Amino acid sequence: MSLQVGCLSFRQPYAGLVLNGLKTIETRWRPLLSEFEHCTLAVHIARKDWEGSEWREVLTRAMGMTCGQIDDLLESGERFGRGVVAGLVEVEETWVCPDSLPREEMLVLEKQALLTGLGQKHLTRLSSSRWLKEPLYARGHKDIWTVDIPLELLPPPPPTPHGASYA
C-alpha cells in the first residue's frame, strides 16, 4: 500500500532547509502551490543546486548562524542524497507579496523564505515538515507531479490541532 501525493522538486540547499523546518515560505513567480492549500506535498531533492547564495546571507544576517552551524545544517539536508523524495510538508495559504510592505515586515518574510527580493512573488506558507524514514528514489519533474510513497516510509503524522485525528 502507498500514499499518493503531489510532489515538487526543490534544489539544494532549499530542500533540506524546508525539511529541517527553517524555510517556512516557498516563493514562486506564479501561484503553483495555491491549488494544494491544506494538502500534504512530497519534497523531492533535485540533483542541481540553487544558483544564488541569498539563503546563506539570510541565515547569517537574520538568524545569526555561524559558518559551522550552516555547514552542519547543509550536511543534515544531504542525509538522503539527491534525486530522491525525502519528506513531506503541509501546504498552507498562498498570497502575492506586495512591493510596498514596510521594511520590517519584508525582513520577517525574507527570514521565513530564506530569500531576498520577494516583491510580486507568490508566497506559500509551509508547515509540519518531516523527513521520510528512508529516501524514495525518483526522477524529478517540472512543476508538481504525483508520487506513490510506500506506507512503511511514512513518518508519523504531524500533530493535529485541538485533538482532531486523521481518518
Image (cartoon, rainbow, N blue to C red):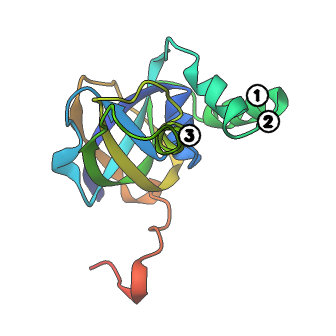
Callout 2–callout 1 Cβ contact below 8 Å: yes
* Secondary structure of residue under mark 1: helix
Q: Which residue matches tag 3? A: 111
Q: Is residue 10 above or below residue 153?
A: above
Q: Is residue 109 above or below residue 49?
A: below
Residue type at numbered disc 3: Lys
Q: Residue furthest left?
A: 35
Q: Which residue matches tag 1? A: 71
Residue type at numbered disc 1: Asp
* Secondary structure of residue under mark 2: helix
* Comes first in the chain, label 2 or label 3: 2
Q: Which residue matches tag 2? A: 69
Tell me if I can see residue 156 in this picture. Answer: yes
Give the percent coordinates (x, y) of residue 59: 67, 33
Q: Residue furthest top?
A: 51
* Secondary structure of residue under mark 3: helix
